[in-house]
Image: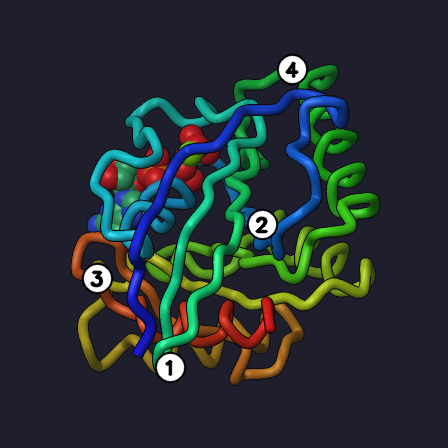
Amino acid sequence: MIRVLDAQFLTTAVEESGWPTADLPEIAFVGRSNVGKSSMINALTGRRKLVRVSNTPGRTRTLNFFDVVLERDGTRRTVRLADLPGYGFAKVSKTERGGWEKMITGYLERRTALRGVVAIVDAEVGATEDDVRTLAYLVSSGRRVLVAATKLDRLGKAHRKPRLTATAATLSVPRDTVLGFSATEKLGVPEVWDALWTATS
Ligand SMILES: Nc1nc2c(ncn2[C@@H]2O[C@H](COP(=O)(O)OP(=O)(O)OP(=O)(O)O)[C@@H](O)[C@H]2O)c(=O)[nH]1
Ligand SMILES: [Mg+2]
């Protein structure tokens, strides 16, 4: 059982010069705009308002870093979570989209502290074309990737496991790297922390 002892916002960055010193094992959260990245970080840390959640998709345009103190069996560890801007928001211009890609690929390629990426998909919607493309990129980057299918609460219980299996197949990733999650019902919180503890060990 992993306990969250403390969670704090650290900083916001637009460019590489704004990244915090790479002194802690880091986990990045990537996903479609409005998929529930910020809500997931809030649910994981048990802080309702650590990260801003909005009804305006595409709001997060920067990298936002959070430091979280964890404890498991008497061992303490501080990890850093990076909330990345969402992709696939239709209303942003081509220039902005290019900017997003540069920001994300630059971060994924050069961030030495990065230990793993949580790729978030919408369990109700299923993996989209954008998700498939992003997962292929993440896997090819050689990074450790965990898929979290969030908003699982929106699916009837009988549909949940089959949807996770289908999501793994669509994304061409091993079934055991896809975890179900819900920020509203707090589903999957211990399972995601277990995976992140392993990734940051
Ligand atoms: N039912 C349900 N709704 C959720 C869940 N997680 C997030 N939401 C809702 O989805 C919307 C988007 O959530 P955010 O956490 O802001 O999503 P985001 O991916 O950070 O969005 P951007 O930063 O704009 O890309 C909000 O209205 C949330 O309340 C969930 O697990 N279940
Ligand atoms: Mg957000």
Q: Percent from the top left, x then y, of residue 164?
A: 42, 75
Look at label 1 and name its amino acid.
Pro
Q: Residue at x 74, y 63 (%)?
A: 143
Q: Quadrant of residue 35?
A: top left
Whichever of callouts 2 and 3 sits on the residue coming sooner in the sequence is 2
In the structure shown, which secondary structural element does the residue marked by tag 4 occupy?
loop
Judge left or right: residue 98 versus residue 62: right
Pointer 1: residues within 10 angstroms few (<14), some, or many (20+)? few
In the structure shown, which secondary structural element does the residue marked by tag 3 occupy?
loop
Q: Residue at x 24, y 52 (%)?
A: 46
Q: Mark 3 and ligand 1: say if the CB distance to the nearest ligand atom is below 8 Å.
A: no
For the residues marked 2 and 3, what is the alpha-carbon distance in whole angstroms?
A: 20 Å
For the residues marked 4 and 1, what is the alpha-carbon distance in whole angstroms?
A: 36 Å
For the residues marked 1 and 3, what is the alpha-carbon distance in whole angstroms?
A: 20 Å
Pointer 3: residues within 10 angstroms few (<14), some, or many (20+)? some
| Residue pointed to by mark 2 | 28
| Residue pointed to by mark 1 | 162
Look at label 2 and name its amino acid.
Ala
Q: State yes or no: discs 1 and 2 in contact (Cβ < 8 Å).
A: no
Judge left or right: residue 5 versus residue 122: left
Quadrant containing the C terminus in the rendered view: bottom right
For the residues marked 1 and 2, what is the alpha-carbon distance in whole angstroms?
A: 27 Å
In the structure shown, which secondary structural element does the residue marked by tag 2 occupy?
strand
Q: Residue at x 37, y 81 (%)?
A: 162
Q: Residue at x 37, y 45 (%)?
A: 36
Look at label 4 and name its amino acid.
Ser
Q: State yes or no: discs 4 and 1 in contact (Cβ < 8 Å).
A: no
| Residue pointed to by mark 4 | 93
In the rendered structure, find residue 186 and report the number of the disc placed on it: 3
